[in-house]
Image (cartoon, rainbow, N blue to C red):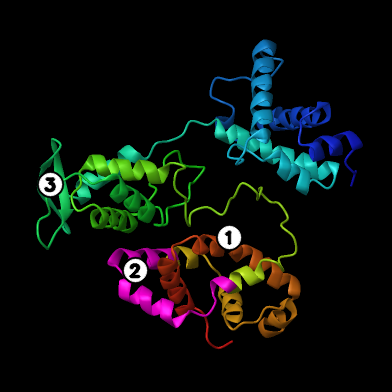
């Protein structure tokens, strides 16, 4: 592999974009535009990138994409692409840098796509769901129909305060969402049973609420204000198809998430448990287990027994050490998302996961 030139290395290490990095970005754009290597929607329905068809427009589109790509490299958070600091850490050769640049341009193009707003569709589903138990109408609030959970004393018709709305959004953000399907323009976001759980959580946190308050909670959850749990393995520092090392460093993290419960903590969680916490924990466990193969469950069972050395695990499972490392990398994103849950919910989720692991190993 061709090593990075001194000028490229200096710009990467210095954290600035000079002529060398700009040339690499331009080359990545040319590779991306040539033969339209990404789906047509990435380029816009009426946008031409072919200099032979419309040189002026093609040049303008290319320059705009270049400016976006430069800006995205320098952004904090890397929401539109890769960060310059990440390239400096990971690029070990000219070929490797070119692959990273391809990923960066793809993400910048993705960030320019029109975003679908699922909130109106979710609110239509909410209106239907709120017309049946366990929800009941309780008059009017601010000129809108008000709802609450059935049973118990009827609460005062008082709008929820900001703290209650924040708690509701925080809890709803833990409900697993469906992954986005690039082939589909619209995503349902939640399957029916999970959306029922979303509404139940909102009703538990807001004694009285209207559709307007449901909209407020959903808008906060679906924005970047709250973490997205259990629906995407992608992070800003993990590019598509990138090699993340040999996997040995991941295994202790997995083992810690499966670690022995503290009895006092478990008892406190049992005592303070709510129906929604238990339901979120169950949904998180199901999302974690969905799609796992027997080999992954066997690996988790061995890790749960406290084994940490790759060689020992390979002997127990009767496979190679490389297989152990590969399987660990495959389940690591799921474990990271489980660890992002509140402690009580995480504990309940991992109890369910443990109950599904094979016992004969």
Lower sequence index among marks 1 and 2: 2
Q: Which of marks 3 and 1 is in front?
A: 3
Q: Residue 266: image x %, image y %? A: 41, 78
Residue 161 left/right relative to 337: left
SS of the residue under disc 3: loop
Would residue 183 be counted in the magenta stretch?
no
Residue 268 bears which disc, if any? Answer: none
Let me know if residue 215 appears in the view: yes
User: Residue 225, relative to residue 44: is it above or below?
Assistant: below
Q: Which residue is drawn at 66% across and 41% down?
A: 82
Q: In which quarter of the image is residue 287?
A: bottom left
Q: Residue 310: image x %, image y %? A: 72, 76
Lower sequence index among marks 3 and 1: 3
Let me know if residue 49 appears in the view: no
SS of the residue under disc 2: helix
Quick one: quadrant of the C terminus? bottom right
How busy is the neighbourhood of tag 2: few (under 14 within 10 Å), some, or many (20 plus)?
A: some
Residue 77 left/right relative to 323: left
Give the residues in magenta: 256-284
Residue 333 bears which disc, if any? Answer: 1
> Which residue in the protein does label 2 denote?
278
Would residue 276 be counted in the magenta stretch?
yes
Q: Residue at x 17, y 53 (%)?
A: 148
Lower sequence index among marks 2 and 3: 3
Q: Residue at x 39, y 36 (%)?
A: 117
Q: Residue 242: image x %, image y %? A: 71, 51
> Which residue in the protein does label 3 denote?
157
The alpha-carbon separation of the residues under discs 1 and 2 comes to 22 Å
Q: Nearer the viewer, residue 39 or 234?
A: 234
């Amino acid at each position: 592999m061709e090593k990075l030139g001194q000028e490229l290395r200096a710009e990467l290490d210095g954290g600035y974009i000079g002529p060398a990095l700009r040339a690499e970005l331009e080359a990545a754009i040319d590779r991306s535009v040539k033969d339209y290597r990404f789906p047509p929607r990435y380029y816009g329905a009426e946008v031409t990138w072919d200099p032979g068809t419309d040189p002026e427009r093609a040049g303008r589109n290319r320059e705009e994409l270049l400016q976006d790509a430069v800006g995205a490299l320098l952004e904090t958070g890397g929401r539109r692409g890769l960060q310059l600091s990440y390239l400096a850490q990971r690029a070990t050769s000219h070929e490797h840098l070119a692959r990273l640049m391809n990923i960066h341009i793809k993400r910048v193009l993705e960030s320019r796509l029109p975003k679908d707003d699922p909130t109106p569709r979710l609110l239509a589903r909410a209106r239907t769901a709120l017309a049946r138990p366990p929800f009941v109408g309780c008059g009017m609030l601010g000129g809108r129909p008000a709802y609450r959970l059935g049973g118990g004393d009827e609460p005062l018709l008082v709008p929820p305060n900001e703290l209650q709305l924040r708690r509701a959004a925080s809890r709803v953000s833990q409900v697993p969402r469906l992954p986005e399907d690039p082939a589909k323009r619209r995503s349902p976001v939640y399957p029916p049973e999970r959306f029922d759980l979303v509404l139940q959580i909102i009703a538990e946190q807001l004694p009285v609420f209207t559709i307007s308050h449901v909209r407020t909670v959903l808008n906060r959850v679906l924005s970047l204000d709250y973490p997205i749990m259990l629906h995407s393995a992608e992070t800003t520092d993990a590019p598509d198809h990138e090699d993340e090392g040999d996997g040995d460093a991941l295994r202790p993290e997995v083992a810690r998430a499966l670690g022995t419960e503290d009895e006092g903590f478990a008892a406190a969680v049992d005592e303070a448990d709510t129906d929604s916490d238990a339901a979120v924990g169950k949904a998180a466990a199901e999302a974690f287990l969905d799609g796992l193969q027997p080999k992954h469950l066997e690996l988790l069972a061995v890790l749960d027994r406290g084994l940490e050395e790759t060689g020992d695990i390979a002997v127990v499972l009767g496979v190679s050490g490389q297989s152990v490392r590969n399987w660990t990398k495959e389940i690591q994103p799921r474990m990271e998302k489980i660890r992002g849950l509140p402690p009580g919910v995480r504990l309940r989720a991992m109890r369910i996961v443990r109950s599904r692991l094979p016992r004969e190993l």
